[in-house]
Amino acid sequence: MKKHWVAIAALFSVLPPGFAYAGQPEALVLSTWNIQTLATQGRKVFDTSFARGPKDYKDLKLVEKTLAADVYALQEVSSPAAAGLVFPPDQFVICTSGQWSADAKGLGPIYDPAAIKAAGVKPECHDQAGSLPDTAVTPGLPAGQPDPLLKQYTMLAVRKSSGVSVTKIEDLVGLGVAQNDAGPNGTFVVRNVRWGLDATLEKGGKEFHLLVVHMKSGCFDGYLRKDRWDAKVDSIHPSKAAGFWAPRVVTSVHGDR
């Protein structure tokens, strides 16, 4: 039986442009990338976010060029336009979680499935520069201040020259539960946790699923201890956990704030 090879490149890997595994000409390189609160120029998601400028996007493009992945599972991207600053739409198809559209329609942060369905909210894929919308700016927002309209979303970027196509993509709305986050002066703010993306990708007549998830970590509420876990994680081989032994399902999971 013919084997289908999948490679996952993390950001700490150094891969030259055009990287391919020796003896595996059909290798597919996947990368998962949390681009910390990526927004368009000068905009901020949080007080602690970095307001990026032209040099910053140039540096991020250099990282992308170094990774040279075929498919990127992305986290913490605030809009399709922001994604396009790192993944040019003449080179990539960019698929955005429907959560971005839901928030633009004012349906969050507590999402009613019936309202989501009635509004026709679903993931959107863009492959032209003119089709990459940005999140609206809050009227009267002072320069340098975080914009409450900016949120974080999961996205997918597929290199057009890779031979990979997106045949189906769906939201995992159920992951977008309401979360009480610490606000100013001891208050709490209800914030939208990210939806997941379930993408069916195809290359060379073979399909596989890529699940993009950016989970709420809770790392600031108490660290995870191995004796609290149900699974015996020491017995799970890393390659099996990453999905190498299940060629039809590859999972990308990120969690922080």
Image: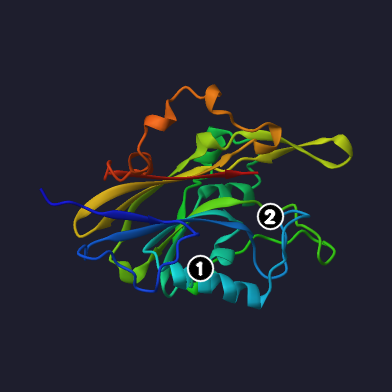
248 relative position to 213: left or right? left
Whole-angstrom CA distance, mark 1 to mark 2, is: 19 Å
Instruction: First in sequence, mark 1 or 2: give its number.
Output: 1
Can see residue 85? Answer: no
Of residue 112 and residue 240, the one placed in the foreground of this image is 240
Can see residue 204? Answer: yes
182 relative position to 217: left or right? right
Q: Is residue 182 above or below residue 51?
A: above
Of residue 216 and residue 112, the one placed in the foreground of this image is 216
x then y, percent, for residue 247: 26, 45
Check disc 1 and give the amino acid type. Ser
What is the residue that sits farthest to the right in this orientation?
185
Q: Secondary structure at mark 2?
A: loop
Q: Residues within 10 Å of mark 1 (few under 14, many from 20)?
A: few
At 60% from the left and 36% from the top, the residue drawn is 111
The residue under label 1 is: 131
What is the residue that sits farthest to the front in this orientation?
234
The residue under label 2 is: 150
x then y, percent, for residue 237: 35, 38
Q: Secondary structure at mark 1?
A: helix
x then y, percent, for residue 170: 41, 45
At 72% from the left and 66% from the top, the residue drawn is 51
Of residue 86 and residue 226, the one placed in the foreground of this image is 226
Q: Is residue 124 above or below residue 25?
A: above
At 62% from the left and 64% from the top, the residue drawn is 134
x then y, percent, for residue 77: 58, 57
